[in-house]
Image (cartoon, rainbow, N blue to C red):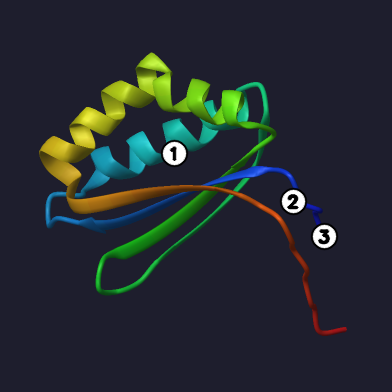
Amino acid sequence: MTNRVGQIAVIFLSVRTDQHGDDYAAAAAAMDGLAATQPGYCGMESARGTDQLGITVSYWADETSAKAWRDHPDHQRIRDLGRARWYSRYEVVVAEVTRDYAWQRS
């Protein structure tokens, strides 16, 4: 398990529209791959329910890295497409991880 204490968690809560076909999947995969190459990237977890509610948490080494990802031109371009086509709403919450723990069945 990863110790995330001190990392910045960027929590992206979203509800998709009905216009989320193959172009959405391709854009999401491209953003996942691009994020993973950015300085300070520490990982990502994502889930989406049948009601189209999605939660993606990306982890960053520090605030500077998280802001650099927010400001990356390719990320900005895809974010604009998301607003125009793929999301009916979203919310971003940024927090510093102060504690973490994990459990796993053996």
Q: Give how far across and how far down residue 64 sits, in percent.
A: 59, 23
Alpha-carbon distance for marks 3 and 1? 24 Å
Q: Residue at x 29, y 74 (%)?
A: 50
Q: Nearer the viewer, residue 26 or 93?
A: 93
Residue type beneath disc 1: Ala
Q: Residue at x 71, y 55 (%)?
A: 98
Q: Residue at x 21, y 56 (%)?
A: 16
Q: Which residue is mark 1?
A: 29
Q: Nearer the N terminus, badge 3 or badge 1?
A: 3
Q: For the residues carrying marks 3 and 2, which lies nearer the camera in this image?
A: 2
Please tell me whether residue 44 is drawn above or below residue 27 in the rendered image.
below
**Contact, mark 2 vs mark 1 (Cβ under 8 Å):** no
Q: Which residue is mark 2?
A: 4
Q: For the residues carrying marks 3 and 1, which lies nearer the camera in this image?
A: 3
Local crowd size for mark 3, using a 10 Å CA cut-off: few (<14), some (14–19), many (≥20): few
Say which mark, if any, is on residue 1: 3
Q: Is residue 95 left or right of residue 105?
A: left
Most extreme residue toward the bottom, as rendered?
105
